[in-house]
Image (cartoon, rainbow, N blue to C red):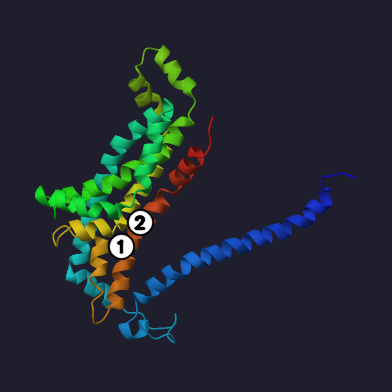
Amino acid sequence: MSATLSPARARRGRPYGSWLRGAAITVVTLVFALPLVWMFAAAFKTNVQVTDPSVGLWFTPTLDNFRAVVEAGQIVRSMGNSLLVGVVSTVLSAVIAVPAAWAVGRFSMHRTGSVILVARIVPAISLLVPWYYLFARMGLVGSYTVLILSHMFVSVPLIMWIMISFFAGLPVELEEAARTDGLSAFGAFWRISLPLAAPGTATASLLAFVFSWNNFMFALVFSDDRTQTVPVTLFNFISYASTDWGGLMAAASLITVPVVLAAVLGQKYLVAGLTSGATKG
């Protein structure tokens, strides 16, 4: 008796497997999409409608929440602060981490890779007290500098950890050929490996930027009213006595749009970077 399935039995099994896979994808999509749908819908409701379960998705939408949030001015300034801190910290982290990841991946520096992994898993909250003491003594608390440096503490190991496997998967023969043509080791990296690593760099940078945009803990401790970022501004909609749900959902919707757009526009590089970094050779 043959151990392989006949073509007829294989064809009969495919619809069931496709249906099961489609059902699983639908369930996962609903789990992730429903909170976003509720958030966007609540942004167009009044506070009374948000807390009324009977309203659901059938209501008369209003733009009062968005109008109040924009006119207050804080959310616009906070989005500018988050964009500044996110872009600068991501660019500086990539400048440091990408060449370092190439060196670790190309020269098989396994111990250095283990140290980077340790830096990735150290809870950032354990560093807040010594960091605050140090930065306060230096007069940096409340400045953009301390926010950028604190975000780089997470972004640099994140980018390095993604790029190490990516560079290790690039054919070493390409760099050897470049060295034969007279390039230095760094020249081979700059002219050969770095262009090939563009999808991985884009992936790591996008993830680092999303982390910086969403980071709440560092901004809450190290920022002030002038340098406040969007997660802290959202937190200000919650008070001891009440919560402005309409304003909170409107502000959350506004700060979600840039991240979603960045993910959609960079989807091609994100997928290519993740799949390329997961293979070797």
The three-letter amino acid code for the residue at tag 2 is: Val
Residue 51, position as x, y percentages in the image: 36, 83
Q: Quadrant of the N terminus?
A: top right
Residue 80 lies in quadrant:
bottom left
On screen, residue 13 above or below 30:
above
Q: Secondary structure at mark 2?
A: helix
Can residue 63 be seen here? The reply is: no
Residue at 24% x, 45% y is 88
Residue at 27% x, 59% y is 217
Residue 186 lies in quadrant:
top left
Q: Which residue is mark 1?
A: 255
Q: Residues within 10 Å of mark 1 (few under 14, many from 20)?
A: many
Q: Quadrant of the C terminus?
A: top right
Residue at 73% x, 59% y is 15
The three-letter amino acid code for the residue at tag 1 is: Ile
Q: Residues within 10 Å of mark 2 (few under 14, many from 20)?
A: some
On screen, residue 85 above or below 198:
below
Outermost residue on the right side: it is 1
Residue 69, position as x, y percentages in the image: 23, 71
On screen, residue 242 above or below 168:
below
Residue 97, position as x, y percentages in the image: 32, 36
Q: Which residue is mark 2?
A: 259
Residue 243, position as x, y percentages in the image: 27, 78
Residue at 33% x, 67% y is 253
What label sits on residue 52 in the rendered view?
none
Asked if the residues shown at circle 1 and circle 2 are in contact, with their CB atoms under 8 angstroms apart, the answer is: yes
Residue 94 lies in quadrant:
top left
Q: CA distance from mark 1 to mark 2?
A: 7 Å
Can residue 249 be seen here? The reply is: yes
Q: Nearer the viewer, residue 62 or 196?
A: 196
Q: Secondary structure at mark 1?
A: helix
